[in-house]
Each structure stands twice: as C-alpha cells, then as structure tokens.
Image: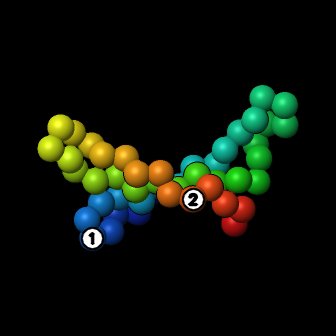
Amino acid sequence: MAARGAGGLDVLGDLWTEEEDRSDLVLHTHVTDGEDGPRLSVRPVYVP
C-alpha cells in the first residue's frame, strides 16, 4: 500500500519469512525526492 502525503510517499509492505511465509509484521517506509534521486527512510516495523 502507498499513500502520498505532503513531502513524500508512505509505503507499507507485509514481511515474509522463509520458514513461515507471510508474517504478521509490516514494514513502514517513507520515500522523498533527494538531490541524487529517491531517498528512502525506514520507519518502524510493527504488528498492525
């Protein structure tokens, strides 16, 4: 899922493991425009 807000794009993604397939964890990242291209900031990993 992605949502554009002021100053960038928030991206949420489900995490997977080799042993158990899809986990209950979600990775939250924030993407903005940087001088050298996209800049990715990793936010908390959490259970929704």
The picture places residue 7, in percent across and down from the top left corner, at: 25, 65
Q: Position of residue 30 (x, y in %)?
A: 40, 56
Note whether 48 is above or below 35 in the view shown.
Answer: below
In the current view of this chain or complex, which residue is farthest to the bottom? 6
Question: Which label was assigned to residue 44?
Answer: 2
Establish if 25 lies above or below 38.
Answer: below
Q: Say what amino acid the circle numbered 2 marks.
A: Pro
Q: Secondary structure at mark 1?
A: loop
Camera-nearest label, 1 or 2:
2
Which element type, helix, strand or loop, lies under badge 2? Answer: strand
Q: Is residue 13 left or right of residue 36?
A: right
For the point 71% across and 39% down, the residue is 16
Q: Is residue 48 visible?
A: yes
Question: In the image as oriented, which residue stretches furthest toward the left?
Answer: 35
- Going by the numbered disc 1, the residue's amino acid type is Ala
Q: Badge 1 is on which residue?
A: 6
Task: Using the image, tell me which numbered label, if any, was put on residue 45.
Answer: none
- Alpha-carbon neighbours of circle 2 within 10 Å: few (<14), some, or many (≥20)? few
Q: Please report the residue visible at 40 percent of the width from the left and 51 percent of the height from the top.
A: 41
Q: Is residue 11 left or right of residue 34?
A: right
Judged from this view, the residue extending furthest toward the right is 20
Please tell me which residue is depicted at 69% across the width and 66% down the height of the picture. Answer: 48
Is residue 18 toward the left or the right of residue 3 in the image? right
Q: Is residue 10 above or below residue 33?
A: below
Nearer the N terminus, badge 1 or badge 2?
Answer: 1
Q: How many marks?
A: 2
Q: Residues within 10 Å of mark 1 (few under 14, many from 20)?
A: few
Instruction: Tell me how the rendering is colored.
Output: rainbow
Q: Residue 35, position in %: x, y?
A: 15, 44
41, 2: nearer the viewer:
41
Q: Position of residue 26 (x, y in %)?
A: 64, 54
